[in-house]
Amino acid sequence: KQPGDAMTGGTLNTSGTFLFRATHIGEETVLARIIEMVRRAQNSKPAIGRLADKISAVFVPSVLIIAVVTFLVWFNIGPAPVTGFALVATMTVLVIACPCALGLATPISIIVGVGKAAESGILIRNGEALQQASRLTSVVLDKTGTVTEGRPAVVGIFPAQGWTEAEVLRMAAGIEAGSEHPLAQAVVQAATARSLVPAPASGFDAVAGSGVRARVDGKTVLLGNPRLLQNGGVDTGALDEKARSAALLGQTPIYLAVNGQAAGIVAIADPVKPDSRAAIARLHALGLKVVMLTGDNAATAQAVAAQVGIDAVLAEVLPADKAAKVIELQARGEIVGMVGDGINDAPALAQANVGFAIGTGTDVAIESADVALMRGSLHGVADAIAISAATVRNIKQNLFGAFFYNILGIPVAAGALYPLFGLLLNPMIAGAAMAMSSVTVVSN
């Protein structure tokens, strides 16, 4: 951060002190917006809640009709005093059928589900996502920053003939010095660690999904994947074997070309998060297919996938094509959850049936997602799905309890037992039973 930069409350200043001006306070702060997201989700209604509304629209008129029929039957064929029996039976039907429990069944489960999720560092933005998460069949994971730490480091430099490691790293650091990409920062940090001064660069141009080109020391330099160099007419054959060897170890090889000639490879490794394998095993245990979607080369992606037990890999995918890959999965009938942290993941997060944003990622990704995981662990995805399943199960139990109670209670209240046993339900007992149904739903 430099003078004039924006700061976010809650971030960490790891060294020194600085003076800042508060520009957003109260409801405008990030924390307040998080609280509002939780509140909005608790007040939203998933599809299963709308189902309860549709049923209620039929149930309430039906009960009124039953009450009228009850009155007429008792008034016409009931014992004396007919008016007294008719009124008591009619009122008892109306009291015992009061759908309080039905109205509570969905919202109270959502409030508790979203609240429990927030306690676990999972921010669910709407009730629909809470329901949909339990129906997922596939989970698509971004690699960098999601499966891996997102803190890559240079682990090898392989110069072409006529070049030294120091020259390759100095050129690469020169072109990457102006970039905020994690791989670029790894290159610059490696040069700094070796006391190399990055070569001055100009005309910096980022090629989405491929790499960068610039003028360094008056020379045209390309730094990126093989596609970037091949499109620039550079023969990469002399470096391909080294690149394959690095990729098989889960490292990302970055090619360097100077004035149309291959100059070397910088190999970068991004360590897998320590809990990624266990979290992915939990997703498998939930019956989900796990797919990794990355712009990295296929060999590196496969090596990382093998480490953590991922089922399928979609590699070398351009940022603009990530959402299209999600659409392809959905076209096959999959209900897709997408997990990512970067700006290039945002369209895919929005396209997925449920988007999960790693909270350590970019604001754009978090805004595009249905669920924000405030921790960097994939365990949050498994936790969110488990909470979703528990909430939907709880709603179904509540709805069943409310309807089952009414179906049993209404005939008794109407006097179905009177001809056989001489029993007629007291309205006060009906009132207590109606209240207890609500207590049951709340307790559940």
Image: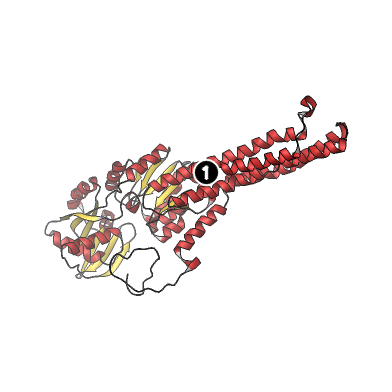
Q: Nearer the viewer, residue 177 or 16?
A: 16
Tell how many labels. 1
Query: In the image, 18: left or right of 427?
Result: left
Q: Residues within 10 Å of mark 1 (few under 14, many from 20)?
A: many
Per the image, label 1 sits on a secondary structure element best described as helix
Q: Give x and y (percent) for residue 363.
A: 42, 61
Q: Residue at x 45, y 51 (%)?
A: 119
Query: Left of 144 or right of it: where is 410?
Result: right
| Pick the front one: 67 or 6 | 67
- Name the foreground residue: 80 vs 270: 80
* Residue 311 percent across, percent down from the top left: 35, 40
Quarter of the rendering occupied by the N terminus? bottom left
- Report whether residue 352 is seen: no
Image location of residue 242, percent across then percent down: 18, 49
Question: Dividing the image into 4 quarters, which one contains the C terminus?
Answer: top right
Residue 165 in sight: yes
Q: Position of residue 166 (x, y in %)?
A: 14, 61
For the point 24% across and 65% down, the residue is 175
Q: Nearer the viewer, residue 48 or 292?
A: 48
| Residue at 38%, 68% in the rendered image | 7
* Residue identified by numbered label 1: 391
Drawn side of residue 438 relative to residue 320, left or right: right
| In the image, farthest residue toward the top | 420
**Coloring scheme used:** secondary structure
Direction from residue 365 to residue 297 in the image, left or right: left
Q: Amino acid at mark 1?
A: Thr
